[in-house]
Amino acid sequence: MNPARRHRAERFGVSVNGTGIALLAALRWQIAQLERSLPQFEKRSPEGQPWTIGIAAIDDHLAQGLARHALHDVAPQAYGDMPAAMGFALALALRRLADVSERRPLLWCRLAQEEREYGRLYGHGLETLGLARSRFLTVTLKKPDALLWCMEEALKSGALALIIADADPKRADLTATRRLSLAAHSGKSAGLLVFSKPQPGPTASHTRWLAATSKSRGPPYDGQAPGDPAWDIELTRARGGRPGAWTVEWRNAAHRFDLVSGVPRGAVHPWTDESGKASAEKRPALRAG
Amino acid sequence: MKAGKPPPKKGLPFALVETGAKDLRLVAVNAMARNFGLGIGQRLADARAAVPDLLSELHEPELDLASLLGLCRWMERYSPWVSPDAPDGILLDATGIPHLFGGEAQMVAEISRRLAQYDYTARIAMAGTIGAAWALARYASHDDELKKLPIEALRIDGDAARTLRRLGLKTIGSLLAIPRAALARRFRGEMIPENVLIRLDQAMGRRDEPLNPLTPSASFIAHQAFMEPVITSEGMDLILTRLVGRIVCDLEKKSQGVTRLNLKLFRTDGSRLVLSASLSTPSHEPAHLLRLLRPKLETIDAGFGIDAMTLEARETAAAIVQQYGFMESGNPLGLEQLNDRVMNRHGAGISTLQTVESHIPERAETFKPQDSFPRHGRARPGHPLAAIPEEDGRDMHGHDEGTGKSRPLLIFNRPEPATVIATVPDGPPMRFIWRRVTHRVMRAQGPERIAPEWWRLDKDEGLTRDYYVIEDDHGRRYWFYREGLYGETQPKWFIHGLSP
């Protein structure tokens, strides 16, 4: 060590015993002592909040909420349920991002073919569901293998709270998801795979969900309008938990799931009665467009 | 330096011919043909008469130029400052280089040895000015002085040379002996080759002559030549690591970060490969640079081996010196580096969604590629992350909560047509066919009328749209619109988006 540095160090009351590493460790320890007495260090818990669904009936089935540094996956129940699966994945992600000690953003990796099939993510729609645009990042890749690579790199980088990715059931197999799982653990990020087709094969995910759309209840002030989105969800696999099935509603405004017990069935269109026939006197001229 | 065209067969007289005004004339001959007394400008018929077994090919100047440029690029292993001097020369700025080869003579010997390996006949000269080197390479026989060379060695055009010869001035030395004023009066051409004085001054170093390099020189370069060609990827990786280490060391001293890197690989067969990597934020972190270059290096075809590698920082900028958090772990530039890796490997960048002031839904936002990202854990004022909504309502509810507008999660780039049965004039759909499946509508909300933006100048603005949020009998949500109004046109229905 050069004499000037030694002198400087000694002035601060650090005993210098030769190596620079020891000096550095000593300084670190000193600063840690100073900072421990500052209020913000006491307030912030290093663990953060657990990642739960927020409904006791469902959280009972999970071990201790969803694992925050692990891989989870959501699959649609049928072909048309893809938006529901994506919406449910986003809702889960929002539950995670609600943790105030988590300030990292969210990355959604899209596959070009899925964007053609179901459309691209729309920022105003994400905001409608409750995701702030400023925390949203996206990337579109052409090949499923490239997407898996990208997700793994993103998980490992540790710069993101959560990575949602479109998954091709053929590529996201047991080996691939095992890799992602390890990456999630090392980067302290969560991964959420959204399968593009129903009935994917086995994966190494911590929890596996099935999602389908459910009829919405409609807002109280307008009998005909669609209400908050509702989904039939099924927990098919949970490490340390047990499976179950529920119908939930996502409250856009409150970032909260609500359990739905029963939804009225049948048509509520203004000019269609319960049997599906249009009532004669109220019915205006129909025209095909 | 003068490079001829490699002959197709050694030991046979060969010439390149060009169609002249009346007949074919020789434009280049090989050594064998020259021994037979053939020369440039001779008619092919005459040459054939003198040498019956003369082989000839039509001269293709573009191919000549292409191969000259190829050779130029290969020459970059000797100097970063290389310029082609068409049709048959290459200029190298060797400032500060010869000592690496053990001296000027050794450097010249090395270059001519390598060129001879590729069957190039080359004449190489090294001098203090471009003009002098040009003259010596083309006209000097052995240890000639510049003064003794003929005046044509000055790169002057034919007319000027003829005039000088008529005046009895045959060597550069004789030209130097006469007063400058006389030369300036006599040759006052605008063009440099006509102006003997300018050429003379350039050769003598009294006038500066810029050299335009083929590739602009980089300010940070690390070069490594090997004793034996390297083929294995482990070997190349080792050298890459060393080169990155060296360039990073230079960058750090100047507190610069690189934003564009070029890795030049010189194959033993004289060809050259260039791998390049771009970075969104200037960086001098060796691990990051290595992670960008390694995947590219793995995919190359080394051919018969690589015998030299050059790493250049093509674009640099002041580095962002990021202090690691004392109590935090993790890399503060993690997102930028992730973006670089995805970008370099798959050509897709991480982007954010940016709102655009427009009523037309598909125009209301764009993907904005990011080159810097908010630091997690410490948002700075003015940074996107600083605007993380606290529980204040507006952002949490989506910005349209107040107006009652709802937007779909997914939007089609091209709205998909659907067959719809609806009430006129502006009722919501009751039944629709989309992707060959019939859906019954259970709930509907609308219309939300969006008129075309008349202030735009393009004519094809479309018609008024009425948007509806539709829920079918499975609870699935669709975002419909009807283009046009009943009564005015025959309206068409489209699905613009899907909601969960």
Image: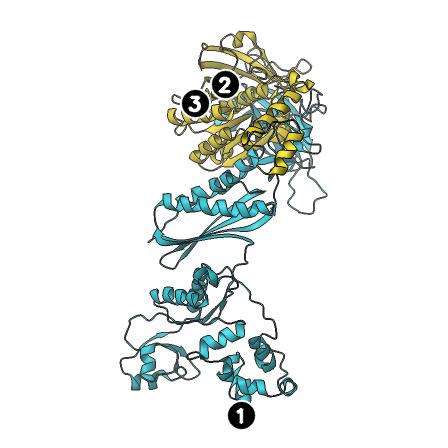
Chain colours: A yellow, B cyan
Q: Quadrant of the C terminus of chain A?
A: top right
Say left or right for B473 vs B56: right
Say left or right for A66 vs A131: left
Q: Nearer the viewer, residue A20 or B22?
A: A20
Callout 1: helix, strand or loop? loop
Circle 3 sits on which residue?
A: A198
Where does residue A251 sit, x and y in percent of width and height?
62, 16
Q: Badge 3 sits on which subunit?
A: A
Circle 2 sits on which residue?
A: A212
Circle 1 sits on which residue?
A: B168
Whole-angstrom CA distance, mark 3 to mark 1, is: 95 Å
Where does residue B304 sit, x and y in percent of width and height?
33, 54
| Residue B348 appearing in the image | no
Label 3 in the same subunit as label 2 = yes
For image coordinates 38% across by 24% down, the residue present is A174
Label 3 in the same subunit as label 1 = no
Q: Nearer the viewer, residue B82 or B222?
A: B222
- Amino acid beneath label 2: Ala
Where does residue B279 sit, x and y in percent of width and height?
55, 43
Residue mark closest to the camera, 3 vs 1: 1
Callout 2: helix, strand or loop? strand
